[in-house]
Structures are given as structure tokens and as C-alpha cells.
Image (spheres, rainbow, N blue to C red):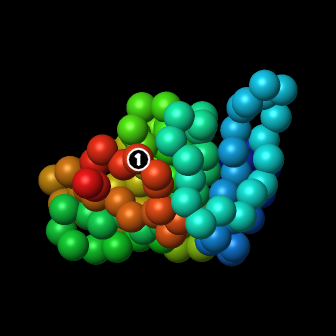
Amino acid sequence: METNTTIVQWLNLVHSSPTFVIRVGGSNENATVECLNVVPKDDGEYWMSGTTILKNGAEIPSVFRIDTNTGGTLAGAYWWIKEKWWDFQNQPDVFKELGVEKSEIFPFDWRCVVDLEEDIYHP
């Protein structure tokens, strides 16, 4: 379960306002909140609302860290499970919280609410 207060605030903001994204980095290395129709390519890391689709077909509300400098690579994912945020890499605890085996989760797919200008994983 995610316990970092700042991260939880970011996750709640993006999840509750899915057309908002958080851009991390840039010339001053600050995070900025933006409302975009399309996230531009080669523009750093964005935190974005979306859905994870597990191998078994289950869907999980999510917030993704997307690297737009590498074609829309998934840099991280947080899953909303039982009213709490979980980093998908927090294994095996996240499997227990979902009540599934690892084989039912991976490989998973993802959909962002806001489109990416370049998404090499979903052409």
C-alpha cells in the first residue's frame, strides 16, 4: 500500500480529475498540473489516469507514470484496490490484495484517459 503522502495526493488528484495530468520535470524539475487533450511526445514524464486490464480480463482503476521520451513507455503504475493505492511492483502483497495469482495478472495492458501523441505499445 502506498503511504507517501505526496504521492497519494498526486494519485487522488489525477484519479478524481482524469483529464488532468501531472507533468514531472522540465527545465525547473517541478511538477505541474495540466489539462490536455493529447500528451505530447518527447515531453518528459506524465502521471495519468487510466485503467489496467489484467491477463484474466479484470480491470483496475489506475494512475500511470508514462515516459513520453521513449514512445509512451509505462514507467510505473498504481492500482486502486479496496479504497487504497498500491504500487503494482509491491509484490507479492498486491497479488494478495487482489486475491489472484501472479499468472492471472501478467502480462497486463493499460489504457490512459488522455491520449498520447506517440504510443508505441498501442499503435
- Residue at 66%, 57% (x, y): give it: 21
Q: Is residue 58 visible?
A: yes
Residue visible at 53% across and 34% down in the picture: 42
Q: In the image, is 54 to the left or to the right of 40?
A: left
In the depicted structure, whether residue 54 falls above or below residue 24: below
Quadrant of the rendered image containing residue 43? top right
Which residue is identified by label 1? 118
Q: Quadrant of residue 85?
A: bottom right
User: Crowding near pointer 1: few (<14 within 10 Å), some, many (20+)?
Assistant: some
Judging depth in this view, the residue of 95 and 10 nearest the camera is 10
> For this rendering, which residue is in front, 25 or 12?
25
Q: Residue at x 19, y 62 (%)?
A: 55
| Image height of 10 relative to 26, above or below | below
Three-letter amino acid code of the residue under disc 1:
Glu
Residue 94 image position (x, y, % from top left): 41, 54
Q: Is residue 85 left or right of residue 16?
A: left
Residue 72 image point, x, y percent: 42, 43
Q: Please report the residue visible at 28 percent of the width from the left and 74 percent of the height from the top.
A: 58
